[in-house]
Amino acid sequence: MMLSEKFTEALVYATQLHATQIRKGSGVPYIAHLLGVASIALEYGANESEAIAALLHDAIEDQGGAKIRDEIQQRFGETVAQIVEGCTDTDLTPKPPWRDRKEAYLAHISHTSASVRLVSAADKLYNAQSILKDYRQIGDEIWQRFTGKKEGTLWYYRSLVNAFRQVETTPLIEELDRVVAELEQLVKVNSEA
């Protein structure tokens, strides 16, 4: 599949929207995450609309809620806007409590489209890979970055795997499971040491 000018436009738009953001605790420009999620989605069969949604998956949540959703719809179409909206755990300010948001998102997975699940799983895989990499480098200090701390973060990623698997098993979900299991095992080994 060849990507069109729409993908390039979405890449520029995502870069502009998230220009001032960095990844929690790492100092890495946020666009690295968005590119990584789009890359994973494409590697697991995303079409262009899904790849564009992968670039924009955090835009509603982080950059302006309904106003940004309308802008995405105007620029990239309803399909992309629906996928991005489906990947959003909240557009409220202030955000509801962390555990409530995560439980609602987990319950929502079984009611979403295959496109939303693809982009969401790509996002969660990228995040899990980043957590695993950073955990290897800095150990338990990493959990201070996360609202859910160690227990909540590990609970959420295992619950995500289970929620995705209730709907389907795909190579992407299997890879997410492998990365989460590796993280769980490493944390367990380090806790016993």
Image (spheres, rainbow, N blue to C red):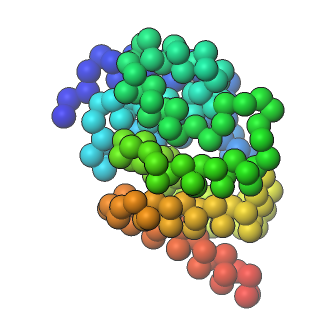
Q: Is residue 133 visible?
A: no
Reply above or below: 89 against 121. above
Q: In this view of the protein, which residue sits in the foreground, 93 or 132?
A: 93
Quarter holding residue 188 = bottom right
- Residue at (45, 17) in percent of width and height: 73
Residue 100 at what x, y percent from top left?
73, 51
Q: Position of residue 175 (x, y in %)?
A: 40, 64
Q: Residue furthest front?
A: 111
Tally of numbered discs: 0
Rendered residue at 33%/18% (across/down): 6
Lateral position of residue 175 relative to residue 160, left or right = left
Q: Position of residue 191 (x, y in %)?
A: 74, 82
For this orientation, the residue located farthest to the left is: 1
Q: Quadrant of the N terminus?
A: top left
- Left or right of 30? Residue 96 is right
Left or right, residue 190 beside residue 37: right
**Rendering quarter of residue 159:** bottom right
Residue extending furthest toward the bottom: 192
Question: Which quadrant holds the C terminus?
Answer: bottom right
Residue under the point 38% across and 18% down: 77
In the rendered image, is residue 98 in sight? yes
Q: Considering only vertical position in the picture, is 100 above or below 31? A: below
Q: Nearer the viewer, residue 58 or 116?
A: 116
User: How far across and how far down the image is residue 149, in percent?
Assistant: 77, 60
